[in-house]
Image (tube, rainbow, N blue to C red):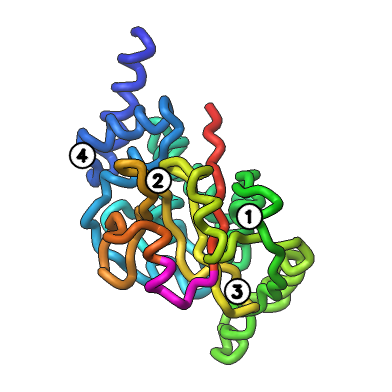
Amino acid sequence: MDSRKIVLFFLCSFYSALGQVTPALRLAIQETRSNHDLTRIGLQFLGKPYRANALSGSNPEELVADLTSFDCVTFIENSLALAHAAGDESVYRKSLVHFRYAGDSVQYEKRYHYFSDAMRQLGYPLLGTRDMLQKLPKSFSFLSNYLASKQPGQINLTLLRSRETQLAHNDFYYTPNALIDRLLPLLKSGDLVGLVSKNPAIDFLHTGMIYRKDGKVYLLHASQEYKRVMVSQQTLGEYLKTHRQFIGVSAFRPIFKE
């Protein structure tokens, strides 16, 4: 059996098991792996509904593997996991754990609650040059403070705060809105972007993929505003001007490993 037939066999068994994937997405996974462009997968989910709080709010944590609805982070996690799995269902689930949890441990405290933490642990390089990147103090204390006010049952706040403290010791860099025009030429379709919060306790308020079309840069994302996966109607620069809750972006380039 040649390599193409082997890939096709895995793809067919994978998608019949999940029952959620179109033939077009099968092809998109192959194209993503060949072209290192995650939007080939992401575009297949256009119109899928936005779903907030899709993951568990406390322990015991269970792995949620769902391709029918997304929030802005699960949209990226699932796209990365599909690309990495290349058609093998068992690899897809393991990959989803890898992209969602530190140490590949399915546990609430081990989840990458801060997107910059995931990017750092996955080794995805931050895009930009010294003249456009600025350091911004971040305490990464938002989640633990929020949960403390809710008396969070089985969540280990000490463990969570320890992780947040480690994150706060790392320098956080971003490109402010005023310098975004310098960053745009460096971005390509499939790069990942976090939209930076004004709140010093949290890194990003939203995430998405860069999508280039007709020489312009757009945001491919699971939009809470429009309640679906979509390409932004505005270019990224225009989007930032009309969404003042974001003060800039941090962009990362995924690394595709065989």
Q: Earlier in the sequence, mark 2 or mark 1?
A: 2
List the residue tagged with mark 3: 202
Q: Earlier in the sequence, mark 4 or mark 1?
A: 4
Crowd rating for badge 3 (residues with CA inside 10 Å; few <14, some 14–19, many 20+): many
Q: Nearer the viewer, mark 4 or mark 3?
A: 3
List the residue tagged with mark 2: 79
The residues bearing labels 4 and 1 have C-alpha atoms spaced at a distance of 30 Å
List the residue tagged with mark 4: 22
The residues bearing labels 2 and 1 have C-alpha atoms spaced at a distance of 18 Å
Identified by mark 4, the residue type is Thr
Q: Nearer the viewer, mark 1 or mark 3?
A: 3
Q: Which residues are magenta?
A: 240-247
Name the residue rendered at 64%, 56% in the picture: 132
Which corner quadrant of the image does residue 22 belong to? Answer: top left
Decide: marks 2, 4 in contact (CB < 8 A)? no
The residues bearing labels 4 and 3 have C-alpha atoms spaced at a distance of 36 Å
Disc ID at residue 102: 1
Decide: marks 1, 3 in contact (CB < 8 A)? no
